[in-house]
């Protein structure tokens, strides 16, 4: 960057945040999965959104609290060149000691015996980070994925990177807020948003299905607002 | 992705793909492999396919939304909706492949009519799967006409399988011992033997070897009609090339052989020795309520009440014929034959009641009955042509006849013609010279409106009476139509008003009135356009046949219609007819009145595909006809 004053301005530092933090952490990170992840540059925030490599991610968890609750399964799929490739899809159940609470089992259809067939958290997070390197993460309701992934990284590597994220819920909320009309928060659910723009029904509460559903929703959202192709990563970043 | 979860994790997409022909034929594992190769695109309304940045040949599968395929000159070729396949970008270099089967389909412009969610797969991947599963490669290597042809072949096979004759051996039907006659005997002796023994067919034996076959028909045709002396040897008139069938064959093969060779008697052999004889009648009687049975009962009825009772069997016959897998052609011919039998019986009753006709006449059937394409309880269209020698006061007799027969037909469920095309209308009860004048006016000074009302009279058949009255009119008429291009042009213009609804399965030309909402009118949008085309071909080429298939067959190879187009058109027509017959059978079984309104939900995705193919064939020929004027 040519101007040092600009870099030092708090605004720009915030915008540059994730890339700066990546470089900082890269120096400290031990060799291995995290180091590999951090060594791939992230897309510039001024990149047109159509050109940004995106990984749609969804977690199923035992609860909403990343400190107490556990990750149950991870699903993800890449969205690149405005195209989702099913070949890139991944779904894995995580083996953990956490007891499955009955209410959640009903939602996620993951029983204890199925969970025993899962893989270790370290293996699953390693796969995720490998796929995520150089990409922006796309989720619906970012808090869960952000907090659980950060927590898992601290647990596994002792440090956590800053993940640039796009949140389809936040994008939809921004639009609704702009209209200055009261709305029911349930309108922001993945299924409701998809229904509203006539995307097909999907079988929710499966990490991969939800990841695909989120990616489709994002493509639809962008097709509405990005007709001239001028929207950049910066415009949609959380 | 980890293998163990493959099946469950993408099950939604798998299920969707699996519901679409030809992928419904793929085993689970291969389907999973295919699904993994899919990509998903979102294309906004008004954009074109393929999506930006995609250059390689791919097959597109519409998950949500609607797209239109337009020909290079901007005409709508087809409209696709959820679950439809778009193969416009599948064959990338089809134009350069000289021996490609698909070169006839020109490049298309594909535009989205709504926001679309599309699945797609690389052609190379499908080709690889197609190499292992021919059902896939066949599907994509064929154009609509070819796919339809395959479908019709399959339908014919189903008809064979569903026939009870298929599972019954010839041995259940043959009559034994066989009636035989020595080759030296005379024709008269043969006729006497037939009378005595009650056989209509004898095998001719020479020195203990069968050398030929002789039927009562042979005696009529080859002896009496030609003036051959009845004292001549029977070997003079026998058929020498005798077909036989082995006793172990099934009855269906026997029926097929007799149908193909136009013979009614077939000797049955065991180890090459004659053991018996099987006749068409023996086989057909096995099929239960059949047209022949019903006709003979009708002939014996003495009152209108009895006829009415018999007429209630008609829907049952139609259901049964449809269930047996009969072609629409066969169903139409059977039902028309029975309507004819009803009409003849009613005429006979009227002649008994009012006495003999004052002058010769013929009772004519018009429209679908004349074309032998009638289905149970359609409306009656009829007319009377009377000998020119009639006096004005003679009309009273014909009026009585017309009233009696039309009322009787109505009693039997053939509703009065809404357009009043019936012999009770004085306009359609006229001497031959008036009919000549009608046709001359229609042909020489055609007005589109008059033609619209009169096309029904270009399909006429004699039901009863002096057939020469109509034949003379027709001969003169065909001579005129062949040379009158203005008339043919007007007729064509009218006919092309009915267009097959290519985008039917989206939101296109649905009948919006009343109870048939969101259904396809098979009769007006599918069958009638073919009937109209066939009529135009017949009138332009001087073909006297009125049955649609016969007209198309006879027009094949004339300047009006190529042989290949004729075959495609017949396939399309038979497919539409089959859908109609099946639809009506379902309605009739539910105790409803039969109609022509098909709901898209009623038929499978595959049939929907064939329906679109059929529409395309019809549209192409309509376009060809239009451009020739």
Image (cartoon, coloured by chain):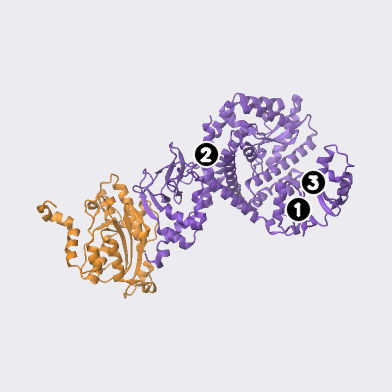
Helix, strand or loop at label 2? It is helix
In this structure image, what is the colour of chain A? Answer: orange
Q: Which mark is residue B141?
A: none
Front label number (2 vs 1): 1
Q: Work out how far the residue at label 3 is from the one at label 2, CA to CA, in angstroms.
A: 47 Å
What residue is disc 3 on?
B239
- Which residue in the structure is indicated by mark 1? B244
> Residue B619: which disc?
2
**Circle nearer the N terminus (2, 1):** 1
| Quadrant housing residue B348 | top right
Q: Are marks 3 and 2 on the same chain?
A: yes
Q: In screen coordinates, is B619 left or right of B115?
A: right
In depth, the one of B34 and B298 nearer the eye is B34
For the residues marked 2 and 1, what is the alpha-carbon distance in whole angstroms?
Answer: 45 Å
- Pinpoint residue B169: horizontal percent, then vertical percent: 72, 59
* Mark 3 touches mark 2? (CB < 8 Å): no
**Label 2 close to label 1 by CB (< 8 Å):** no
Question: At 70% from the left edge and 43% from the top edge, which residue is drawn?
Answer: B337
Q: In percent of the image, x 35 and y 67: which residue is there?
A: A92
* Chain ID of residue with mark 1: B
The verdict on a common chain for dots 1 and 3 is yes
| Front position among marks 3 and 2 | 3
Instruction: Please tell me whether mark 3 sits on a helix, a strand or a loop.
Output: loop
Asked if labels 2 and 1 share a chain, the reply is: yes
Task: Reply above or below: A232 against B348.
Answer: below
Mark 1 and mark 3: Cα distance apart in space: 13 Å
Q: Nearer the viewer, residue B304 or A149?
A: A149
- The quarter in which the N terminus of chain B is drawn is bottom left
* Number of residues whose C-alpha sits closer than 10 Å to that of mark 2, classed few (under 14), some (14–19) or many (20 or more): many
Q: Secondary structure at mark 1?
A: loop
Q: Which chain is purple?
A: B
């Amino acid at each position: 960057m040519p101007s040092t004053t600009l870099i030092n301005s708090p605004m720009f530092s915030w915008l540059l945040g994730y890339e700066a933090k990546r470089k900082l952490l890269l120096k400290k990170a031990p060799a291995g999965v995290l180091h590999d992840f951090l060594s791939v540059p992230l897309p510039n925030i001024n990149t047109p959104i159509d050109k940004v490599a995106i990984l749609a991610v969804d977690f199923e968890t035992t609860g909403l609290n990343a400190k107490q609750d556990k990750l149950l399964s991870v699903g993800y799929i890449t969205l690149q060149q405005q195209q989702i490739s099913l070949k890139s899809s991944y779904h894995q159940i995580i083996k953990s000691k956490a007891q499955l609470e009955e209410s959640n089992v009903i939602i996620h259809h993951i029983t204890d015996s199925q969970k025993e067939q899962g893989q270790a958290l370290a293996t699953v997070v390693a796969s995720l980070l490998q796929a995520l390197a150089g990409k922006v993460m796309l989720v619906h309701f970012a808090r869960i994925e952000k907090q659980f992934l950060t927590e898992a990284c601290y647990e596994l590597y002792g440090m956590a990177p800053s993940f640039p994220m796009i949140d389809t819920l936040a994008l939809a909320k921004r639009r609704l807020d702009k209209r200055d009309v009261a709305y029911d928060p349930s309108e922001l659910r993945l299924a409701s948003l998809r229904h509203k723009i006539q995307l097909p029904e999907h079988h929710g509460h499966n990490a991969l299905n939800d990841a695909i559903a989120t990616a489709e929703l994002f493509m639809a959202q962008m097709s509405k607002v990005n007709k001239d192709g001028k929207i950049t990563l910066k415009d949609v970043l959380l | 992705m980890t293998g163990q979860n493959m099946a469950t994790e993408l099950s939604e997409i798998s299920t969707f793909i699996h519901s679409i022909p030809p992928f419904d034929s793929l085993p689970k594992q291969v389907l999973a492999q295919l699904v993994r190769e899919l990509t998903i695109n979102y294309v906004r309304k008004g954009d074109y396919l393929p999506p930006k940045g995609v250059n390689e040949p791919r097959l597109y599968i519409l998950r949500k939304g609607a797209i239109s395929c337009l020909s290079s000159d901007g005409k709508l070729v087809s409209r696709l909706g959820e679950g439809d396949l778009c193969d416009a970008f599948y064959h990338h270099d089809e134009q350069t492949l000289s021996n490609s089967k698909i070169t006839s389909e020109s490049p298309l412009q594909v535009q989205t009519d709504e926001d679309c969610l599309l699945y797609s797969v690389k052609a190379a991947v499908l080709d690889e799967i197609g190499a292992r599963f021919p059902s896939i490669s066949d599907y994509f290597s064929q154009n609509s006409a070819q796919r339809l042809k395959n479908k019709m072949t399959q339908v014919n096979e189903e008809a064979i399988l569903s026939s009870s004759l298929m599972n019954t051996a010839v041995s259940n039907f043959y009559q034994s011992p066989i009636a035989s006659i020595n080759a030296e005997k005379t024709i008269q002796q043969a006729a006497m033997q037939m009378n005595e023994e009650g056989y209509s067919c004898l095998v001719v034996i020479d020195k203990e070897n069968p050398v030929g076959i002789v039927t009562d028909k042979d005696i009529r045709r080859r002896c009496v009609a030609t003036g051959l002396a009845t004292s001549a040897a029977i070997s003079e008139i026998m058929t020498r090339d005798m077909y036989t069938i082995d006793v172990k064959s099934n009855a269906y093969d026997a029926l097929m052989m007799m149908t193909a060779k136009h013979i009614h008697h077939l000797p049955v052999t065991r180890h090459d020795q004659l053991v018996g004889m099987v006749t068409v009648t023996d086989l057909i009687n096995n099929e239960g309520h059949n047209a022949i049975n019903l006709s003979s009962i009708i002939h014996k009825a003495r009152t209108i009440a009895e006829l009415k009772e018999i007429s209630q069997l008609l829907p049952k016959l139609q259901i049964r014929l449809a269930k047996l897998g009969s072609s629409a052609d066969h169903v139409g011919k059977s039902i028309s034959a029975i309507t004819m039998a009803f009409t003849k019986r009613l005429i006979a009753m009227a002649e008994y009641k009012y006495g003999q006709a004052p002058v010769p006449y013929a009772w004519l059937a018009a429209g679908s009955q004349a074309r032998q394409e009638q289905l149970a309880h359609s409306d009656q269209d009829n007319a009377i042509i009377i000998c020119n020698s009639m006096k004005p006061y003679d009309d009273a007799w014909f009026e009585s006849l017309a009233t009696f027969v039309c009322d009787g037909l109505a009693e039997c469920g053939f509703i009065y013609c809404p357009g009043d095309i019936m012999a009770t209308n004085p306009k359609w009860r006229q001497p031959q010279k008036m009919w000549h004048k009608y046709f001359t006016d229609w042909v020489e000074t055609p007005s589109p409106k008059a033609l619209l009302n009169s096309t029904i009279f270009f399909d006429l058949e004699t039901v009863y009476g002096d057939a020469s009255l109509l034949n003379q009119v027709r001969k003169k008429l065909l001579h005129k139509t062949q040379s009158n291009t203005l008339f043919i042009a007007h007729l064509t213009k009218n006919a092309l008003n009915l267009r097959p609804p290519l985008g039917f399965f989206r939101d296109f030309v649905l009948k919006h009135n009343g109870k048939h909402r969101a259904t396809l009118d098979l009769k007006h949008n599918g069958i009638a356009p073919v009937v109209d085309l066939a009529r135009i071909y017949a009138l332009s080429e001087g073909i006297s046949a009125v049955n649609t298939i016969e007209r198309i067959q006879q027009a094949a190879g004339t300047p009006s219609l190529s042989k290949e187009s004729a075959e495609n058109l017949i396939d399309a027509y038979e497919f539409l007819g089959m859908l109609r017959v099946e639809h009506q059978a379902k309605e009739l079984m539910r105790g409803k009145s039969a109609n022509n309104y098909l709901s898209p939900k009623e038929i499978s995705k595959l049939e929907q595909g064939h329906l679109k193919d059929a529409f395309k064939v019809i549209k192409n020929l309509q376009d060809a006809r239009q451009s020739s004027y």
